[in-house]
Amino acid sequence: MITPEEIRLAEETLAFALASGADSVRITLNKSLQDLVAMRDGALDKVTHSLDRSLQLTLFADGRFGSFSINRLEKKALEEFTLDALATLRLLAPDPLRSLPAPERTAKDAVTGLEAGLFDPAYADMDASARLDLARRSTIWARKASLEDGFTIISEEEEYSDSISDSLLIDSNGTRCRHTDTSFEISCEVTVQDPSGARFSGFWWDSRPFLKDLALEDCALTAARRAAAAIGPVRCDGGLMSIVVETGTAAKLVAPILNALGGFAIQQKNSFLDGSLGKKIFGDNVTIFDKPRSIGRNGSKFFDSEGVATAETPVIENGVVKEYFLSTWIAAKLGMSPTIEDCTRACVAPTGGCRDCDEILRSVGEGILVTGFNGGNYNSSTGEYSYGIEGFLFKDGRKVHPVREMLITGDLVTLWNNLTHAGSDARPCSTKSIPTLAFRNVNISG
């Protein structure tokens, strides 16, 4: 997708920046194309086509650092832009800890952009007619009457989209990395009404790098069933209870852990896991790996935004914190060894002997099945959280009735020390491989 001419311009801009006084340079060239078809109640609602192209110029000169972006890829414009960027750079305060990553740390095996196995040649065959056909095939509006039993489907909003993105990173240390991927996505929200007039919504989505794997026909049907299942919510008593959190929803409880291990949060003393590296913070059954080189899986990438090579690594292993995510700059500020800047593709290891949500429900026996979060937040410094939840009360391993407008509160370290189960049912459409999770002794209020 990035043309040879665009690559040549990026290389010439790098050389021009060095010749104009930069000590070192990194250039990242990004290009993406997305087409979207939206349906409303079975009819075409909107069509969008968007192309984005940018060149990010990162400069190091006289102990100073700056990052600048432009979308005009013409030789004269790029030269003027580079000179203006250098002039601006020299107005900034020195930051001697800024530098390119050491060449031995950068990726050497991301040459063509196809190494991650995320490019579908079928994308070349997509046109307006094909996209409209896929969007129409996914809707259930024309057959909604056959699904209605005790409720009425009153609206269906659906979006089909496909995209291709291509990025090239080069620097003055000789780093050269490329990543290319395609994505095909379907999402749907269905709203139903019960006989009393109360309305309930259900949402579902799927996203795959290969069109043949996209669960096109199942999306709207699943959304409708999730909406219908929420009819008739009942308030239940709170207290300390077990919760089972669906795959696809459970990432909400993993993200704060990964954020707390980020270098910026550590350096700013804004992390509840500050000082945890090498320490046993969680129980033996808590293991999270970063698996960025899972070929053909959403989220895989061979390098980060600095060009540093990714690798499979334990983030937390048997409860012990093994990794902080430290860019070159943050590592220098902390006086630590750099790693990569972020967890690329987190995977929670199975525990508790159950494969999926149904098996976990039977094993746990009684509690709340969480199918969605409704607002709330957590304190990044203390790990204290408060999240609104919706889902189902379950007893004897079976769902009894829907619940909503409930709240879970506590702190994340205690929560994860109360992990009892992690399945092996992570959705392949997610960029992070988070399965169904179960926790005991969670404080719930109605």
Image: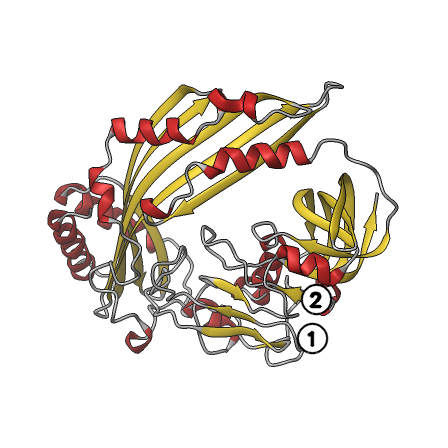
Q: Amino acid at mark 1?
A: Gly
Name the colouring of the figure.
secondary structure
* Label 1: which secondary element: loop
Where residue 435 sits in the image (x, y, percent)?
57, 59
Q: Nearer the viewer, residue 17 or 195?
A: 195
Give residue 60's quadrant in the image. Answer: bottom left
Task: Say above or below: 71 vs 64.
Answer: above
Q: Nearer the viewer, residue 406 or 402?
A: 402
Where residue 284 sits in the image (x, y, percent)?
66, 78
Q: Amino acid at mark 2?
A: Leu
Task: Say above or below: 396 vs 96.
Answer: above
Query: Distance of mark 2 from mark 1, alpha carbons?
Result: 8 Å
Identified at 35% across, 53% down, the residue is: 67
Identified at 45% across, 21% down, the residue is: 42
Q: Which residue is mark 1?
A: 283
Q: Which residue is mark 2?
A: 419
Bin the neighbour count of mark 1 within 10 Å (Cα to Cα): few under 14, some 14-19, many 20 and up: some
Where residue 399 sits in the image (x, y, percent)?
74, 47
Q: Is residue 429 left or right of residue 309?
A: right
Label pair 2/1, CB-CB below 8 angstroms = yes
* Label 2: which secondary element: strand
Q: Nearer the viewer, residue 364 or 84?
A: 364
Could you tell me which quadrant the C terminus lies in?
A: top right
